[in-house]
Image (cartoon, helix red, strand yellow):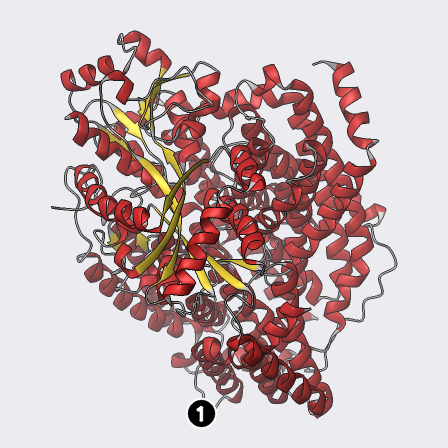
Amino acid sequence: MDWNLLFSSYSNVFLDPTTLLMTLLGAAGGVLLGAIPGMTATMGVALLIPFSFGMDLIPSIGLLLGIYCGGMYGGSISAILIHAPGTPSAAATLLDGYPMAQKGEAGRALSVAMFSSFCGGVIGALIMTFLSPLVAKVAMKFTSAEMLMLAVFGLSVIISISGKSIAKGLISAFFGMLLCTIGLDPTYSKQRFTFSVTSLKGGLSFIPVLIGLFAVAEVIAGVERIIDGRESAQAKSNEKITRVLPDGKTIRTIIPNIFTGGIIGTFIGAIPGAGGDIAVFVSYAFNKGTSKHPEKWGTGIPNGVAATESANNGCSGGAMIPLLSLGVPGDSVTAILLGAFIMKGIQPGPMMYVSELPTVYKVFAALMLANLAMLLVGCAGVRIFAKIVSLEKRMLYPIILVVSLLGAFSINKNVFDIGVCVFFGVIGWLMNKYEFPLSPILLALILGPMCEQNFVRFMDLNQGNFSAILNYPIAIGFFVVAIGVVIFSLINQKKINDREAANLGSFPQE
Amino acid sequence: MNRERKCLLLEPKKTQTKAFSNMIVSILLLVFEVWAWIQSNSIKTAKNAAVQPSTFPRIMILGMGIFTVILLVQSVIKLAGMKADDPLAAKAESLNFIKNKGVLAALFVIALCALYVYQFKNLGYVVVSFLLCAIIMWLIGLRKPVKLILISLLVPLGMWLVFYKFLTVNIPMGILQPLRDLVDMI
Amino acid sequence: MKKFVTILLSLALVCSMAVAFADYPDKGITAINPWGAGGGTDNCLRAFCAALEKQLGVTITVDNQTGASGVIGHEAIADANADGYTIGMITWELASYKPQDMSDYTYENYTPLCRVNTDAAAITVNAAWAKDNNVTDLASFIAYCKDHPGEVTMGGSAAGSVWHVAGGYLMNEAGIEIKMITYSDGAAPAVKAAAQNEITGVTVSAAEARSFVESGDLLMLGIMDSVRNPIFPDVPTCAEQGFECYYATQRGMALPLDVDAAIVEKLEAACAAAIEDADFVEAMANLGQKIDFLNGADYGAYLAQAAVDVPAAMVTVGLIEE
């Protein structure tokens, strides 16, 4: 570790007005883009690449990292306020974020999300600064076998997010995995379940399904509740936001969640092919499992928001590690960042730490700056964003609907996707009615392709001999942990059910 | 409160309980799984493949099937020896749209959404969204015409402007296409 | 409010009618991109449109209509109004749709304007493996493959993608048998897998394999191009090593059929001029993409040839049956 170089790079980046301005602009744009369902950080980064043509490397990287970090937080805004995760990485945030908003704590949820995003981002940036070469070495150990078992490990957390009925959770999960197989198969390009529909040949797009299952389903259910008289059409949040950062007491309770979330996010983000969307669920399940009150998770507690938001921003630091040291992007945003580096004549890869060390250090500093900028923008925005839920429900629901449907369209500019979105809105509505949990579908949609691709590739490379997996100790390790997680969550779920039954028993005495 | 709870637990007939609805759902799911399995037969096979393209989907259908059967067995057992305080003996959500106005409204919204998709290209985003937004607002009780029309017009228009002008996302405008040309000129 | 809207609408209507009767082009042009924002095709198209704007004097909006492996966007270009106000970028994949039953559209559904860019495939193998097996150049690699049929595994990004089919082309031309492994997330994971020795090598473009070649983990044996790549001046082409094979991904501009001949001519001339634009040349150099211009007629002939070569290579990698 070259401290002088580190110090000079940080001061170089933090004292350059152009870089500061660009990063701040990027963060503001990223938060806004992330908050619109269907507009992901990827799109924001892609749109701004042409503007960065004329800039120097570091300001343009600052701009792009600003969007990246801002977008990661921005996604949680719509997840918390309108039950529509703005980005896939915010999908787990709504598990606790939306119930918080329903309880009239939207502002608090936003500030917890912002604070955890910032801390997670800083943890990621620190790990990236000090442990990059080490983490990169571990990432190079990941072949198809390890990726397959990592996916299996990811799937093992399904039990923990299944809710009361594990059978229903697993049906959802398998259904989600089945949905991923629609389209061309990843090895031989054979069509599966396409029914000769052109738009199905590339498979279902993730974002329209996501928006449908959560936002559209919520609107349909909301209309039903209002007409039934179970919810007031004039209902609105009257929360008074007195502070933009969480109070000391809240911070004390969420610190452990932030810490573990940030670390889990960074390490999962550092594995090419695994990103924030997986990290958030693993972090949520881990924090729920180790919590003293697992039964409170999902009812709207700040810990749930903290665990997920710290993980997805930690991921941004993690994803930069394979990008810089291996030239392999960790997710779709870093894939575009890779293009930006190459455009500036810098080839990320194993040689970068040798030939371009000052640039690497400046990127570390820029990521730290981007997280600070996100915090600044977030602080300024909390009051404004929380205003959305002060609209009456009878206005809010229709607005959510037209905004969500546009989001579903804009991802591919394909009308078919709006149809997909509405279809999954109906599915989500029915699933909620009959108490099938939605999150397992989501996790399955994220992990399904990873699972299948690596499984088939592994079998292909080993002539169909699955027992060759025994030669991969890391893979075996993941598998063992996955089994452990399943057993542990089963015990935990029983505990939750018992406690709830006990609560139910004591109820009539009130 | 106490009495109300007891009523909720004791009143519903067996066919209205959650256990019964679980049974119906699992039977429907089994039908879906059989259908999906039959569909998977039409997937083409690949030569010399270690894993056929149809293998993975079939494992998933099988997995779904196993847990559907478990759910079915669970609910049948519950139904046979039903106790009043079982959580599954509570009244299940209904889909009867004749008796239940809420369900009718939800189905109406779904039908509107289907029309929305159907007319999206022809009429354009702003027009269909205006209609969808206005009708739903009226449906759930906003009866101030000016407010209703203003919100349903300005939200889609604003979204379109932001997407088109700042994010360069081209959204079909249908019959309002001249508006786009106008914005292009500015 | 209503009155205002009516006035606005009629005003817009009058304006647009005036536009329709003026000389082409007198309003904004839409350029459809079948691939996502921020990708290689997108960067290329946006840079080219910026140059084309200067020639035509109107704004060109890039419209990313993605999905179904690019089929949606390709079909949208062919189905667009034939008034010259919708153009699009067609890519290598067009030749692979019909044989795979993905779409009924072929190059015959388009009016080609010009080819903009090509990127050649390179044969790159793991350096340690090459050393162990005395593979030093293309000839020794092909000899090894002939001695060990089906043992060598090569990665080429996603199934049915240009680099995956490149493997089939290599097999056909060299008369060897190798096993193609797919990496759905693109070229970078395949390159990494080759560096990890999970697979023997990759058939992706030279630029995509660059970082691990420079670090010494991978060894580039040859490039399937007619000239050497400026990034790797020391790596010989395949033809230089006595093995005539050329294979590249390509991107070009196209119109729907039945566009007025005068408009096609005007656009072709504008494309030919835009390709020389200094900013475009610089942008392409920065992107590491090779400008490889062909005019409309030559591009049409090139596409016709690709419609024969590509399916043949696809049969070899097992994507389609004969």
Percent coordinates x, y for residue A274 in the rendering: 49, 38
Q: Is residue A35 above or below residue A69?
A: below
Q: Can residue B48 be seen in this view?
A: yes
Q: In this view, does B93 lie to the left or right of B1?
A: left
Q: In this view, does A289 lie to the left or right of C273?
A: right
Residue at x 44% of width, y 69% of height: A415
In the picture, which quadrant includes the C terminus of chain A?
Answer: bottom right
Q: In which quarter of the image is residue C193?
A: top left
Q: Can residue A171 be seen in this view?
A: no
Percent coordinates x, y for residue A270 in the rendering: 55, 32
Q: Is residue A232 above or below residue A492?
A: below
Q: In which quarter of the image is residue A66?
A: top right
In the picture, which quadrant includes the N terminus of chain A?
Answer: top right
User: Viewer-proximal residue, C38 or A216?
Assistant: C38
User: Viewer-proximal residue, B68 or A412?
Assistant: A412
Chain that bears disc 1: B
Question: Residue most toward the right?
Answer: A242
Q: Name the residue under label 1.
A: B98
User: Viewer-proximal residue, C255 or B70?
Assistant: C255
Q: Is residue A259 above or below residue A393?
A: above
Percent coordinates x, y for residue A199 in the rendering: 36, 62
Percent coordinates x, y for residue A95 in the rendering: 60, 57
User: Viewer-proximal residue, A377 or C288?
Assistant: C288
Q: Tag 1: residue type?
A: Ile
Q: Quadrant of residue C147?
A: top left
Residue at x 79% of width, y 20% of height: A7
Residue at x 18% of width, y 15% of height: C143
Disc 1 packing (10 Å; few <14; some 14–19; many ≥20) = few
